[in-house]
Image: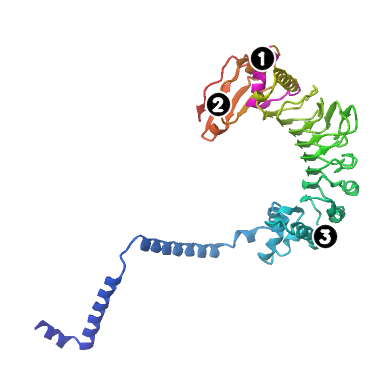
Amino acid sequence: MKFSFLMKKIPLFLLISLLSYLYLLSQYKTNMPKRGKKVKEFEDYQLYNTRMSKRNKMWKDDQQPMLSNFSDDILRHILSFVDTKYAVQTCVLSKRFKNLWKTLSHLTFDNMNFSNRMNIGGGYYFRKFVLHVFSHRDQSINIDTFSLAYDYSRKDESFMNEVTNYLVLYNIEELIFRGHWVDFCLPVELIIKCPSIKSLEMNGFGSEMLPGGFCFFMGLKKLHLSGGLFPYISQNHFDPFSSCPNLKSLYLGKCFLGGSSEFSVFRISGPQLVDLGIFNLYLVGHCRIEVCTPMLTSFTLMHSLPLSFTVVDLPALRNANVQFSSPPSLYHSNKIRKAAAYDLTNMFRILCHAQTLTLSYYTIEILSNAPNKVKHKPSPFTELKKLKVKVQHGENSTKIPAYVLKYLLSASAYGASLEVEQSWLLERGHRLAATASRGCNSRARPFLAL
């Protein structure tokens, strides 16, 4: 009855359409997969893309990309921190970068960036690239820094001649040679014709690297020497830096002083030297080091054993860092231990004006193993304000004898503070901080958590 009524009121084609829609809807619900984790993740991903696209649109509408807002000077400064090979590759970024690398005043070349896994043809392409940069860069721009990391051999003599001939034409200020330069001899014309050189770094150099020593580097202010061989001829003393009156910073690392005869004194002189670092300096025979630097404010010595120093006055010294890497337990005899303690206490007399003193725990052990050398000697540190002891993991940092503390801190007129740090405890925020009075009667306190 009702169905016949609907047939009269509703047209047939509308009824068929409605029934078809209901059928298709039922089939869709039957075949539709259940809503699970993957479907939810897909919907979340679509929502994330929608939000990011809106954010990117707002960013494009508000301002241009940050890189385009930088001036050429800032971009050149950024490119000065990377190898010149990668600086040249930036020319494909945009038209603005096409010629930007040609105006760089800092040139850094490293042969390792041109060597493949088989190390075939790396040297050839490296030399070709260096000369390509020389020929295509803006010739009106001076070279402030030139760094060359390369393993030199005799067959590269013509290449180095082209490099030095090019550098002579510009007012270069910083010159860096890294790699293997045992057979290389720095051309005298480069030294004489470039009085503008203020910083020189040489790594892996031989005895013939500098003909005539440093006598031509009158304007040199910073000198960094590592992994090289010093020649000497004099029987009495060896003073290689006396011809550098403007030298302010000197670093000697893993250098060997050898020659045909032994000398008694290795002298480090510099009327304006303020920063001196010695790292594993190997001396032949019974040689003493004499530091004649009245303006020295910072002194760093890192070595396996104490070195023998001639006692001189360093009135301007403020920071001293003395760290030895070999534990005293490896010393073969009592005589060697006493000699090490003697050299160490003798060196402390030079550092008497230091206000901040940093020692390794092996340095403390050298003093602990020779109580007779320490107990009856007055403390040399009259101006000390802070003593810092660095400890490696596994060392017993709390066992510092009282006589060692007294020797180091008793003469201080400022009530020097003692700070002992252990590397693995520092990562967890632990630190031993103990304040020692002028009489040094206080003992080390346990580690305190910050």
Q: Which of 355 and 122 is in front in this view?
A: 122
Residue at which label 2 appears: 432
The amino acid at mark 2 is Leu
- What is the spatial separation of the Cα atoms under label 2 and label 3, in whole angstroms? 58 Å
Point out which mark residue 371 bears: 1
> Quick one: label 2, few (<14), some, or many (20+) residues within 10 Å?
many
Q: Residue furthest top?
A: 376
The range drawn in magenta is 348-375
- What is the spatial separation of the Cα atoms under label 2 and label 1, in whole angstroms? 24 Å
- The quadrant of the rendering that contains the N terminus is bottom left
The amino acid at mark 1 is Pro
Is 363 magenta? The answer is yes
Residue 167 lies, in percent from the top left, at: 84, 53
Is 316 magenta? The answer is no
Q: Is residue 182 above or below residue 302?
A: below
The amino acid at mark 3 is Gln
Point out which mark residue 139 bears: 3
Residue 238 lies, in percent from the top left, at: 87, 31
Camera-nearest label, 2 or 1: 1
Pointer 3 or 1: first along the chain: 3
Q: Residue at x 74, y 30 (%)?
A: 297
Residue 104 lies, in percent from the top left, at: 75, 56
Pointer 2 or 1: first along the chain: 1
Q: Is residue 162 above or below residue 377?
A: below
Q: Residue furthest left?
A: 1
User: Secondary structure beneath disc 1?
Assistant: helix
- The answer to whether 251 appears left or right of 416 in the picture is right
